[in-house]
Image (cartoon, rainbow, N blue to C red):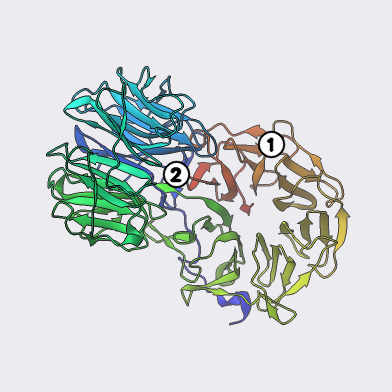
Amino acid sequence: MPGLRALAHGPLLLLLLAGPRAEASEAWTPLGPPGGDVRSLAADPRDPRVAYLGTADGVLYRSDDAGQAWSLPSPGFPLRGMSLDDLVVGPDGSLFVAYWEVQGPGGGVARSTDGGRTFTLLPGLAGQGVRALAQAAGAPQVLVAGTLGGVFRSEDEGLTWRRISPPGHEEIRNVNSVVLDPRDARVIYAGTWHLPWKTTDAGVTWRPVRTGMIDDSDVMTLNLDHRNPDTVFATACSGIYRSADAGGRWSRIRGIPSSSRRTRAFAQDPFRPDTLYAGTTEGLWRSEDGSLTWRLLTAKDLVVNAVLPLPGGVVLLGTDGAGVLRSTDRGRSFAAANTGFSSRFIARVVTSPGGRVVAAVGHDRRYGGVFTTLADGTWAPLGTGLEGREVLSLAVTGAGPEEIGLAGTDDGVFLYALHCGFWRRLPTRIAGSEVNPRVIHLAAAGTRLVAAATPQGLLLSRDGGESWERQVLGMAAEVTAVAFSARPPHQLAAATPLGVFRSEDEGRRFVQVSNGVAGAQVRSLAFLPEDARVLFATTPIGLLRSADAGQTWARYGAGLPHSDISALAFGGPGAVYAGEFQRGSVYRSLDRGESWAAIEANGLAGERIFSLAVSGDRLLAGTTASGLKALSTRSGGPPAAGGTE
């Protein structure tokens, strides 16, 4: 198979975007790919067809058909970077969200009275990392929150809170789970990172309830039997426990192997009380005899974070990576139910000269990879052969029969062969040894030239990846970014921690043109398509631009922030788009990067932008937690002519 020419053209070669188009410069439209991490699930007791889903990055989804399809209420939950670990829906439909800051100590409780469209951040718990939330069954105005600092109680639906655990208590802290006795809201169980506690007087006094439980058990969930609240179930890192005397003594439930005993989710079927579900780090287990015997219902490598039984035998699972799984036969079989839901990190989105698009899902070795849509608009992984590898970079080049796709991974470079239906590793042999390096960036030109930026240096192939030569540029071996100019003869630019290098003969000879880029780490390089003298560099301190082939650099553009610019894309002549990482803002320049203006459109607020591309008249933004989104460029600039980061 002669290198890059191995790929035939076809409708499944690359990602063909499907889904609704965004209104012109008004809203970013979610596109997928579906799936990702789910932290929590809850249903509206008035109408169980209405379900809610929380993610680990502050995104809330809603379903109106018992979990078959999902949508983003707009504007939705207002805080990104928050893990939505517990959702509670009250008898009047009010939605309470317990959240904690993933990269810090903050958090709180938020309330929505309009189905998740808008939220009020409730005072009194601001700054508390809230890991658990419960509402009293007979007194819905009573809420109890478990935080890293202790246990708090509200008697006015969250408007005010008071601490009910002793301040500074060495044990009643790092609270993971709470539950209230439906007969008496003063009776509260609290599970901590180290065993459970109980109060029968709304927190005036507390006592440990740990007899029979293995010491140092991290109590993840607490549940009271619907028929008899004196029967309590607790799940912990050491297994599942049952108490028949309101926590007086615990016995460990048998039947689930010790390797699967770390149970993150637990639920009792409200319609068949003897049926229990245990969501573990090794699949979903079910008991139909009140916990005497258990059966594994899913693949053992499935991590289950949430279990939600619904009427009619429907069971929803929230998982790591696989998103939502749905059963209509009480767990006997499951199918993906991720329509409209995407909690994916889009590491790269790239368009080809023919206008096709490729999206790589990063940071997920099991459920990541490269994704495509089928002819009916549904999504599927693009081929096999990348399993267990993290895709870090993509390149697409050629047109028609010459169109090819390349993936740079943490384990070398791979090529997609359509007629074989799988990815094939390209042999990156240097001096007779196979290196298979971590490929940070890929660039391709024509159908034969490929350049790979790696910690071991610049790797260059002139035969579509069948053979490689290594270029050591200056004193630093590592190459952080690489780019080809759009027009032949293709110029090649490469960045190292010590400078920028440039070749005018397709990589045969390099000259160091600068001793760095304003002292900043270069994350990506890109030539202006219509003028190879103009070179851009994305860095943590802003977008830098050189108008003299990389010799001098300056932070360009009135209106563009001097902050982390993580992505770049080109539209029509003079049109450049830049993505700002932290705030989820996208900027547009219509004068080759001289001046900039923020694109005013809903749907990206608080997102972290990691990649950009232009496809036809749509701008594509790859986020770190919400998948791929699209925005029409028709009213915000000239029609796009194609281009990539």
Q: Is residue 74 above or below residue 340?
A: above
Image location of residue 83, percent across then percent down: 44, 39
Q: Mark 1 points at which residue?
A: 563
Which of the two discs, 2 and 1, sits closer to the camera?
1
Q: In this view, does 141 lie above or below 198?
A: above
Q: How many labels does the image show?
A: 2
Q: Say left or right for 83 vs 46.
A: right
- The front one of 448 and 319 is 319
Measuring from the top left, give residue 311's x and y in whole percent: 16, 44
SS at circle 1: loop
At label 2, which amino acid type do we have? Answer: Pro
Q: Is there a contact, CB below 8 Å, between mark 2 and mark 1?
A: no
Residue under label 2 = 30
Residue found at x 33% / y 54%: 280
Instruction: Kindly indicate the quadrant of the structure image that contains residue 353.
Output: bottom right
Within 10 Å of the Cα at label 2, are there few (<14), some (14-19), or many (20+) other Cα atoms? many
Residue type, label 1: Ser
Q: Nearer the viewer, residue 312 or 416?
A: 312
Q: Earlier in the sequence, mark 2 or mark 1?
A: 2
494 on left or right of 242 = right
Give coordinates of residue 355: x percent, y percent: 56, 57
Which numbered circle lies on residue 144? none
